[in-house]
Image: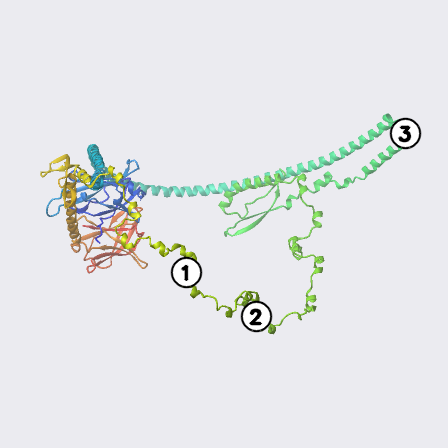
Amino acid sequence: MIQNPRLPELTLDLQKTTVFVSRPFRLTQADKGYIQPFRLTNSWSAYDVSEINLNFAATKPDGQIIDIKKEPNRFKQENGIWLFYLPEEIAQAVGNVTAYFYVTDSSDTILATTTKFGYEVSARYGDDVKSNSYISEIEDMEKQFQEYLANAKAQVNAQNDLTNEYKQKLSQILSEMSDKVATWLSNKTAAIDQDIKSRQDNLDRLNADYQAKYNELVASWQNKIAEINTDWEQRKAEIISEAKNQRTDISNEWESLKSKFKADRDSAISQANSDFKVKLDTIQADWNNQKSKLEQEITDFKTNLENKVQVVTNKVSDLVTHTYPDLSSKTDAINTKIAQLKEEFSKIDFSTYATKEDLQKVQPDFSKIIVQNKTLDDKREIKIFSHHLIQNPDEGFWVVSLAEGDTVPRRVQKMDAAFPKMKEKIGNLQSTKADKSELSNYATKSDLDHKADRSNLSYYATKNELDIKADKSELSSYATKDDLNNHQVDLSNYATKSDLDHKADRSDFSYYATKNELDNKADRSELGNYATKSDLDHKADRSDFSYYATKSDLDYKANRSDLSSYATKDDLGSKADRSELSNYATTGDINSAIQNVRIKQDSLDSDNNYTSGKVYSPEWSDGYLTFDMSGSYATYKTRSLVNHMSAMQEQITQLQLEVKKKIKLRSGDIIHGVSNFTSSESTGVFNMAKFENWQDCQFKVGIQASAEKFNLVFCQDPISSSTSQGQHHFVWNDVAKEGHEFDVYVSSDNETITLKNLRFIWLSIKTNFYLYVI
């Protein structure tokens, strides 16, 4: 099977950052069946769209247009590449064809258009080819009209089995349908002509805008190149001057940084000493507050206790003097109670409470406090330095110097940020002290004295382990191993293996009958008077005689040979009664009605003059009622279609011959190569067998390194069929800022040009290789 030829692949972007993606592809007049591969992108990223929303438009050199809309069968996607089957109208007129794809939504609104591309159609030898426009909507209308005519013709052919009344109704319906189709076609044709004119005007306007914009961009680009060259020379001198100034500034800034570093270090050490003094003052003040608070609590306790004793004394005195003077007998008891209270008061041991002198003794000795810090010494090794607190004799506070051994500027610069965090942690530590009221949930040392250490619990069993153990009291009903060893079983009631050897297994009894089963069976000697099954096979069952007739019954029946001239009940069931046939037409009536059938159809005379609504009458031919429709418009369209198909077949044959011909290369042509990847090497291969003069041409190698960048660059050094094997080439991609290297191998026998030893190229299926004909 001959495959459709494919044109080179296009990359079409909806943002249209380039005017034309490539120079026009060459076609020969009357070429058909070509496939145009293309990638559809948006900002160089793959654009997802359905076949039903893809459309194609083109303007032919003779002014005819092509607008293919809603034809999803023309589009096919393979591995991210769209394949578009070009219409045959694309290669009818000689000249350049401008084309583009566009995307519509469900309401046929145009959403976006692609970069334009073109085809260069050259003349073929022989007769010129008629050029026609191709618009999908008009083609659809013609197909619908052909379907209407085909359906009408099929209905006419089916009228042979209809009655006269139905024939008249069908003729009326066909007439109405023909009028409606003619009216619809006329209205639709006018609307389409108007739409074509509007589209042509828009296309002309777009072409004019495009040409103006193209000229503007070319002029702007030339000016931009001149500006860039001028700006570069100026910028180069400025860069050299700026570099010298920056080197001087860096040297000055370095000296400044060294001076600033020394000042910052001295300031940080001073600030650290100051912060540490503040911290010690805070600790001293906190201690003084705690000591004062404790002394006040002891004084308050004594005062409260003395007040309570005085209250008791006053109450007793009041009882004795005023309230109960007549209770003198109880005075002794009261005095006794007072004496008892005094005795209990005397038992209070105030020696357990701290005095002011005691509190002064427990004040910490700051001279014994040592502060240690880790830092790097002169050899950049980590060492620990110890520092003693030093008391300032004038102000009475303690200070510490942390500068000894510290030679790392980064350490000093971070001290200023570290000390506030230390101060914050000390404040947090003071604020997180536990209140005495919060200690009720904690255990004291005396509580822990009665607890076991967890490390000693490994020899003990947990409650869960004890839950699955039996209690000793429950084992009384169980036998021990010693009991089982001393217990002898009496085996006298059991059979040995030798006894069982003479016994039958119960599973074997299924094949034997029991005595009870044999009691119900007959003895063979008693069966002599009985019939066997074979004897009964030749006998009829009396219950079956009801289906048979006796000899007396047959005497009143007719013989089958006498019934051939009679109809059965089944035969009569499908026949009509004579009284029912009055409402039916005879064969003569039907033949007369058929002869009165007429077909109204548009026609063409011998001079191809169009006649609307011509009436055709039937004629008998070989026993059939036929209509001579040879002059009808439908027959003309069918004949045209047949002629068109014949011409297409000739063109296909011509195309097959053209495909077999080798292409003659011209200057400016571009040949696309194939990326070949194996486990051992990766190459780019150009098949030159289809070009007749390739050995006489020189080429420049072009590389499109990745589909994401779309940067096509050509090597400046040309190659040809006489290039030495393994010749090395290098090309620099200034846009992508990357270089590509390869070696060229030319094979005249295989007619191939191969790029090997590819380096600095992101090889993938998206890597493209090109040959530009010089």
Q: Is residue 123 visible?
A: yes
Q: What SS does tag 1 mark?
A: loop
Give the percent coordinates (x, y) of residue 232: 28, 41
The three-letter amino acid code for the residue at tag 2 is Ala
Q: Which corner quadrant of the image does residue 240 belong to?
A: top left
Label 3 or label 2, whichever lies nearer to me, is: 2
* Number of on-image labels: 3
Q: Are marks 3 and 2 in contact (CB under 8 Å)?
A: no
Among numbered discs 1 and 3, the one appearing first in the sequence: 3
- Residue at the disc numbered 2: 504
The residues bearing labels 3 and 2 have C-alpha atoms spaced at a distance of 120 Å
**551 on left or right of 7:** right
> What is the residue that sits farthest to the left in this orientation?
607
Q: Nearer the viewer, residue 204 or 464?
A: 464
Q: What SS does tag 2 mark?
A: loop
Judge whether 557 appears above or below 268 on screen.
below
Rendered image: mark on residue 328: 3
**280 on left or right of 12:** right
Badge 1 density bin: few <14, some 14–19, many ≥20, Cα 10 Å: few
Quadrant of image for the N terminus: bottom left
The three-letter amino acid code for the residue at tag 1 is Ala
The residues bearing labels 1 and 3 have C-alpha atoms spaced at a distance of 146 Å
Give the percent coordinates (x, y) of residue 5: 21, 50
Badge 3 density bin: few <14, some 14–19, many ≥20, Cα 10 Å: few
Rendered image: mark on residue 540: 1
Which residue is rendered at x = 82% and y = 29% of the image?
A: 315
Label 1 or label 3, whichever lies nearer to me, is: 1
Q: Are marks 1 and 3 in contact (CB under 8 Å)?
A: no
Which residue is rendered at x = 56% and y = 42% of the image?
A: 422
Q: Nearer the viewer, residue 58 or 96?
A: 58
Q: Nearer the viewer, residue 716 or 669?
A: 669
